[in-house]
């Protein structure tokens, strides 16, 4: 079983992923800011620190062998370009060196499906994160969802008829499948599988694979 360090464990996906990993026998250490510890599911080891301040946690990554980076702005939108730079980009710029210094063997990163006609600032930041991971030379799994459906994230269900049509038109089928909606359960399953089956080199998991389980 893996020894996992999670940055972003108090968030939308992290709170659901941690119990899944613990149930499968993995050991989990989760990073949380002081005052947010109670948001972490029971059973994980708590590391108090700030994902935007390397000295607060970098020496606490060990003895993990797997690093999962889930830090990011909640409810991304085109109006949050500055936040993407300040949080999403800065956190991955800190996380990759921290993971490499700790001797992490497998880095798991949630990026975003691209190219796409919108959310260019978000895509640019997440693409930069992918680039930093590749430059590090570490083994990594990069997941590229477009939009994750779940509690508080349900309005895109209204788009499902549109996707249904686009996936069946030859000219739009490939894009519609690549930018399709995934459920929170599918996302957690994909992350769990990434931990269970560490990559050699860099593996990219696109939306169709997540939807197929």
Image (tube, rainbow, N blue to C red):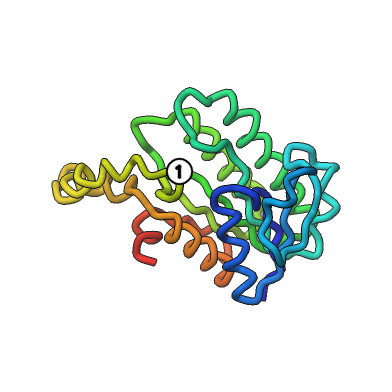
- Element class at badge 1: loop
Residue 52: quarter of image? top right
Q: Quadrant of the N terminus?
A: bottom right
Q: Name the residue furthest front.
A: 38
> What residue appears at the point 44 percent right and 29 percent down from the top-left corner?
120
Query: At 72% across and 64% down in the image, what residue appears?
Result: 44
Q: Nearer the viewer, residue 188 or 212?
A: 188
Residue drawn 54% across the image and 38% down it: 74
Foreground pick, 127 / 32 = 32
Image quarter hosting the C terminus: bottom left
Label 1 environment density (alpha carbons within 10 Å; few <14, some 14–19, many ≥20)? few
Relative horizontal placement of residue 164, taking residue 91 as reference (left or right)? left
Asked if residue 114 is positioned above or below residue 120 in the image, the reply reads below
Between 213 and 157, the residue placed more toward the observer is 157
Image point 46% across, 30% down: which residue? Answer: 77
Apparent side of residue 119 relative to residue 24 in the rendered image (left or right): left
Percent x, y for residue 91? 68, 39
Above or below, 60 against 26 in this view is above
Report the residue marked by disc 1. 152
Tag count: 1
- Image coordinates of residue 81 in percent, x first then y, are 53, 25
How far across and how far down the image is residue 186, in percent?
A: 42, 60
Horizontal side of residue 187 vs 37, given as left or right: left
128 to the left or right of 210: right
């Amino acid at each position: 079983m893996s020894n996992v360090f999670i940055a972003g464990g108090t968030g939308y996906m992290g709170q659901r992923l941690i119990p899944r990993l613990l149930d499968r026998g993995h050991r989990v250490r989760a990073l949380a800011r002081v005052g947010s510890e109670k948001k972490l599911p029971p059973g994980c080891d708590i590391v108090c620190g700030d994902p935007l301040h390397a000295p607060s946690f970098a020496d606490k990554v060990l003895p993990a062998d797997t690093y999962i980076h889930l830090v990011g702005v909640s409810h991304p939108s085109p109006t949050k370009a500055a936040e993407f730079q300040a949080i999403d980009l800065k956190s991955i710029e800190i996380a990759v060196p921290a993971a490499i210094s700790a001797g992490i063997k497998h880095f798991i990163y949630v990026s975003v499906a691209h190219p796409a006609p919108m959310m260019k600032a978000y895509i640019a930041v997440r693409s930069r994160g992918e680039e930093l991971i590749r430059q590090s030379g570490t083994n990594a799994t990069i997941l590229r969802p477009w939009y994750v459906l779940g509690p508080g994230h349900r309005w895109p269900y209204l788009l499902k008829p549109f996707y249904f049509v686009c996936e069946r038109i030859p000219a739009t089928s490939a894009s519609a499948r690549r930018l399709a909606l995934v459920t929170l359960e599918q996302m957690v399953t994909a992350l769990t599988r990434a931990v269970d089956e560490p990559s050699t080199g860099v593996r990219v998991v696109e939306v169709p694979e997540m939807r197929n389980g």
